Image: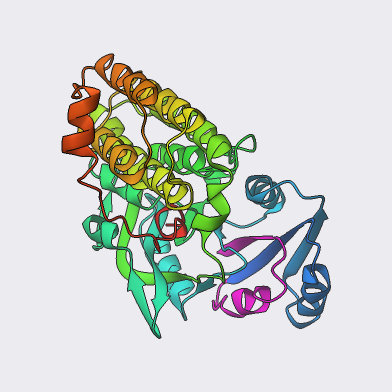
Amino acid sequence: MKISIIIPVYNAAKTIRRAIASIDTKQNYEIICINDGSVDDSKFVLEQLQKEYKNIIIINQENQGAAASRNVGIANMSGDVFMFLDADDEFLPSRIDFMADYYQSNENVDIVIGQIARENNGDWQTIYSHESIKKLDTVNMAQCPEMMQSIGPGAKMFSAKFADLRFDEDVVFCEEHTFIIQAYKKARDIQLLPDIVYGYNEQVGSITDQLANQFESYMRDAEKVRARVMDTLLLREARIYYSYRMDELIVSYLIQAYLVEHKIVTQQMLDNVISYINEMQKTDYAGEALFRIIKVIEQGSVKWNKTLYYQWRNALLSVGIGRPNYYRFKVEVLPKRAKFRSKMKLKQVLKR
């Protein structure tokens, strides 16, 4: 069996060697590195690595983003299965072959999903919300919508039958969701593993800080992605679960990340959130997810005025959610300020 390992590379001169060195397998394999217009020494480092690892393929392109880079990798692969590795992450020792053994032992298995973890004081710490899929089991989407917890490209081995799928290139936020959900839907069997196979590494600087200034465009991307995924999910249970995954565990944290940096409520911020809430009404959604968004907005922002509050109140009333009048809101709701974790890195809820 041949494994294609696809690595988008953008300004990763300091980490790409570690990533490639972590590719530990006895299988026949190729490493496809897409240098996505890096302006640091990534190209030079890749060329040096190519002299050490004869199975590295380097594709240089102008900067187009991670989605386009992964799509180029898929289009140029020749493996029986393929995997993704980010240039700042790593595989754990022998875990690629561990996954390959399960893939090869059952001809109906089209995807193998292992556990992803982040480094914490020298130990690998798994994702808390993945407990429901932290097990040895063979499932499909209908049986286990919880597999959508693992919605990033890492820690997965895909059959080459999914090489016709593509990542969304017209968005930069949650661009992997459509690809992953379509693969989950098409798969006959999906092998879940309780073992950590993939580690992601936090870089200097919080993703929260980087995203705060791109809030509006990311909210628009989230709306697009959400609509696309919901259109593909036929089962109501799956749509409700995706709402929990997307609306509560991603979008509410995006809003939270923005409010950590920009606490004052504004017309533009409310317009973006109201637009997203209206998009939620077009499909099934988890009520808890909607109420977390409401809590983040009301208890994470400051300096409400009567005009903005009534815009917010009327938007919620239009979807069947009652809110108090402005004066009760100031007395009863605003004092209950939530203590959101300001150090929460959005990477922890996106990259998994």
Q: Nearer the viewer, residue 148 or 345?
A: 345
Q: Is residue 318 magenta?
A: no
Q: What percent of the width, then of the height, locates residue 12?
A: 69, 68
The colour scheme applied to this rendered structure is rainbow
User: Is 233 drawn above or below residue 349 in the view shown?
Assistant: above
Choose top left, top right, bottom left or bottom right for residue 106: bottom left
User: Is 327 drawn above or below residue 21 in the view shown?
Assistant: above
* Residue at (62, 67) in percent of width and height: 87
Q: Quadrant of the C terminus?
A: bottom left
Q: Nearer the viewer, residue 75 or 216?
A: 216
* Residue at (28, 43) in percent of width and height: 299
* Residue at (82, 50) in percent of width and height: 62
User: Is 234 drawn above or below residue 299 in the view shown?
Assistant: above
Q: Which residues are magenta?
A: 1-27
Choose top left, top right, bottom left or bottom right for residue 100: bottom left
Residue 242 visible to the viewer: no
- For this view, does 250 lie left or right of residue 154? left
Q: What percent of the width, then of the height, locates residue 187?
A: 40, 42
